[in-house]
Amino acid sequence: MRSFLAGSIVGALLLIIYFFMNSPKIVTYSLLLLGIIPIIISGLLSGTFVSGERVRANYSDSTDFTRRTKTGSMFFLFGLPCFLAGLATTYFI
């Protein structure tokens, strides 16, 4: 929950900066990058981009599995508000 709150705060601060800049494209791109990069890292940590057999081979230890899953979900929860704020600035503003 802290990572979601941190992502929301970063997204809100960049949205405030967005309204005061003369060239808001930089803020939009930074919001999208701050959203996409943690989501990709989350996918790598959770094993989303590999086959099921490879996931079973990689997660033979349950403590490693829970640690990687927790870290991956923290990255995802941080990147989600930033990505949504970037989409909002791209399409609605």
Image (cartoon, rainbow, N blue to C red):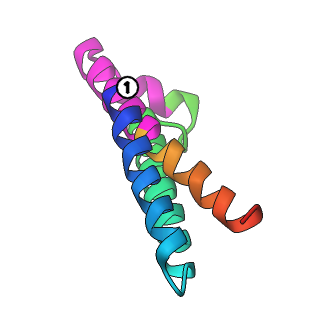
Q: Position of residue 39 (x, y in %)?
A: 49, 47
The residue at which mark 1 appears reads as 69
Circle 1 sits in a helix, a strand or a loop, which is it?
A: helix
- Compared with residue 56, is residue 10 higher up or lower down, i.e. above or below? below
Q: Which residue is drawn at 43% across and 59% down?
A: 34
Q: What residue type is labelled 1?
A: Thr
* Furthest-top residue in this view: 62
- Compared with residue 38, is residue 67 higher up or lower down, i.e. above or below? above
Q: Which residue is drawn at 26% across and 17% down?
A: 61
Q: Main secondary structure of the magenta part?
A: helix
- Compared with residue 84, is residue 34 higher up or lower down, i.e. above or below? below
Q: Does the magenta stretch include residue 37?
A: no
How many numbered circles does the render carry? 1
Q: Residue at x 76, y 64 (%)?
A: 91
Q: Which residue is drawn at 53% across and 86% down?
A: 22
Q: Does the magenta stretch include residue 58?
A: yes
* Furthest-front residue in this view: 20
Q: Position of residue 58 (x, y in %)?
A: 36, 30
67 and 17: which is toward the camera: 17
Q: Position of residue 3 (x, y in %)?
A: 34, 34
Q: Position of residue 8 (x, y in %)?
A: 44, 42
Q: Residues within 10 Å of mark 1 (few under 14, many from 20)?
A: some
Quadrant for the C terminus in the image:
bottom right
Q: Give the range drawn in magenta.
A: 54-77
69 horizontally vs 90: left or right: left
83 and 48: which is toward the camera: 83
* Furthest-right residue in this view: 91
